[in-house]
Image: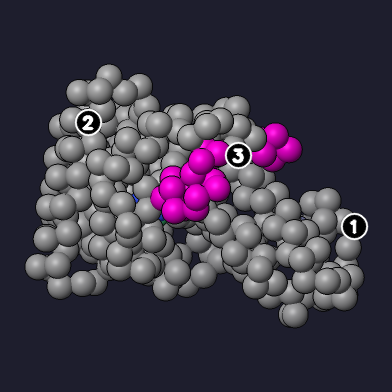
Amino acid sequence: VGKYGADIVITNAYLIYKDDDLKQKAIDEGLHKLINFDGPVMTDSGSFQLSVYGDVDITNSEVIEFQDLIGTDIGTSLDIPTAPFVEREKAEADLEITIERAKEAVKIKKENNIEMLLNSVVQGSTFMDLRQRCASELSQLDADLYPIGAVVPLMESYHYKELVDVVMNSIMYLPDNVPRHLMGAGHPMIFALAVAMGCDMFDSAAYILYAEDDRLLSTRGTFKLENLQEMPCSCEVCSKYTPDDLRAMPKKQRRDLIAQHNLHVSFAELRLIRQAIYEGSLMELVEERCRAHPALLDAVRQLASYAEDLEKY
Ligand code: GUN
Ligand code: ZN
């Protein structure tokens, strides 16, 4: 982490809770010792597992109390990441639960004088009025951070235009002075667009998941190792090895090197975005990045329809 310059890390409290050894270690020594990081640590609650497996063995109050117990700096309630394009009834029913749990988390925090900061995740599937309502209601709670949830399926299926609608309709109803975290966003191709919309934080396992699959991240898209004649950048890995070198390596060694490249390009893009903000040229960078894929071009055009709000928020 020091090497790449991350100021904060995220891990998953539910996965620690589910593993007897990790759980005991986290309780005895604390989360920071467990993952060997003494900066701020955020934890997720098992909501993502809930969305993938349909069920988790923990309640909202249990996961809040567990996160505090192990010394998490920023904890998350057990929101329901409702998938995009579901029936409205489902999105509404899920949203009621998400909002109830966010309220319960704040109540538990207040009643027990818990110092841990709280994430309240905006849900509402692809219904813009539900995103707006969720963001407005959560804003009343004085939570400490407002992540935007359930965007991974949109990004994985190239629904970037809908991503713009979902993020803008959430952000317009959130307070201006509380960080917004685009949960699960890990492809550097979309970072500039997300920052232009007002997102402050990202987290993702993309760098390692893509590496497992021999895929290299780039701001221009994703490269399959099998198709590469040349390495795509000038990071340590790309300078030292050729695609043939990597292809000839044992799987694990190759995965770790590709993961290093993936992290390098992700952090390099964040630096470039920060510099563009200082220079006042962020929108030019967004336009450039959105040439990478036709669906991203649609997204940046969709963003133009929010021009007034974009200036404001
Ligand atoms: N990680 C990726 N998406 C989500 C989400 O919607 N909620 C939570 N809690 N974590 C996530
Ligand atoms: Zn590289």
Three-letter code for the amino acid on which mark 2 is drawn: Ile
Q: Secondary structure at mark 3?
A: helix
Does the magenta segment cover residue 279?
A: no
> Which residue is more in the foreground, 231 or 97?
97
Q: According to the image, label 2 marks what residue?
A: 108
N-term mark: 1 or 2:
2
Start-end of magenta stretch:
1-26
Left or right: 175, with 208 as reference point: left
> Which residue shows up at 45% across the image and 69% down it?
156
> Which residue shows up at 76% across the image and 66% down it?
252
Q: Secondary structure at mark 2?
A: helix
N-term mark: 2 or 3:
3
N-term mark: 1 or 3:
3
Whether 156 is drawn above or below 92: the answer is below
Of tags 1 and 3, which is closer to the observer?
Answer: 3
Does the magenta segment cover residue 6?
A: yes
Three-letter code for the amino acid on which mark 3 is drawn: Ile
